[in-house]
Amino acid sequence: MNAALAAAATLVASAFALSTLDRWLRRRRPHDLAWTVSLALFAFGAGALWWAESVGWGLGVFRVFYLAGAILNVPWLALGTVYLLADRLPFGKRFADRVRGWLILISGFAVGVVLFAPTRATVTGDELPTGKEVFGVAPRVLAAVGSGLAALIIVAGAVWSVWRPRRGGSRLTIGNVLIAAGTLVLSASGTLAGRLGKDRAFAVTLLIGICVLFAGFLVATSTRPVRALDQTPTQELAADVAR
């Protein structure tokens, strides 16, 4: 079951990443590119979990899982939120470009740290190990700061959208709220771990969270009202995917 859930999360994240990549290639909007990178990282993290649940954990697959699934994915998701709101702020685009530049540098630094960090224990077996069991301080600090600060930015973006609605702002507000909700679902794996186990909790929250995130992407960037008179919300989302 864990392997099946991880496989489903991998396939869903990959499909959504291809969708946002197509949107970026057609429209060249920077938030679509940031979301594409984030979803690709989610796919790598879920793929590493899929591999581990199928053949067992090893140090190499845990490094990929930790880097893509615990450090880099949420910061790139937050960059999409920054770009999404940048057009509505003075000098917002310039600020977002600077954030992207710093994030690229930090991402490269994180890759070096995680791939070459010394380990405290051998990674084997069928159960997902924790970062505290395997790594020293540096990778764990990157995970805590990256995920925590980035999630705070996403939630703050949703609150700002609700507090300061603008023309056409209903789509942006609902989209940002869905993105924040998806982020909170992804962070709920620790809460569910006691009931489902670490591996299954991560797979379940990843699968549900990515679906909520993608719904937020579609709503926030839709060119039509969220509730058209002649379409249900499900039909609108399906039309966006088809485009």
Image: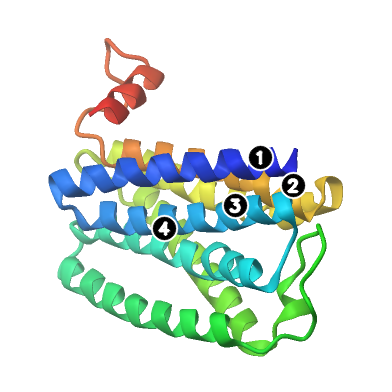
Pick whichever of labels 1 and 4 is earlier in the sequence. 1
Pick whichever of labels 3 and 1 is earlier in the sequence. 1
Residue sticking out furthest to the right: 194
Which residue lies under the disc numbered 1?
A: 5
What is the CA distance from the residue labelled 1 to the residue labelled 2? 8 Å
Which residue lies under the disc numbered 3?
A: 186
- Residue 16 position (above or below residue 238): below
Q: Nearer the viewer, residue 227 or 25?
A: 25
Specify few, some or many for label 3: CA neighbours under 10 Å numbering under 14, 14-19, or 20 or more.
many
Q: Which mark is residue 38?
A: 4
What is the CA distance from the residue labelled 1 to the residue labelled 4? 20 Å
> Of helix, strand and loop, which one carries label 4?
helix
Q: Nearer the viewer, residue 174 or 121?
A: 121
Specify few, some or many for label 1: CA neighbours under 10 Å numbering under 14, 14-19, or 20 or more.
many
Residue plotted at (61% across, 72% down)? 63
Question: Which of pointers 3 and 1 indicates the residue nearer the eye?
Answer: 1
Pick whichever of labels 1 and 2 is earlier in the sequence. 1
Q: Nearer the viewer, residue 44 or 147?
A: 44
What is the CA distance from the residue labelled 3 to the residue labelled 2? 13 Å
Pick whichever of labels 2 and 4 is earlier in the sequence. 4
User: Within the image, what quadrant is residue 62 found in?
Assistant: bottom right
The residue type indicated by label 1 comes to Leu
The residue type indicated by label 4 comes to Ser
Question: Which of pointers 3 and 2 indicates the residue nearer the eye?
Answer: 2
The residue type indicated by label 2 comes to Arg
> Of helix, strand and loop, which one carries label 1?
helix
Whether residue 173 is visible here, answered yes or no, is no
- Residue 136 position (above or below residue 95): below
Contact between labelled residues 2 and 1, with CB atoms less than 8 Å apart: yes
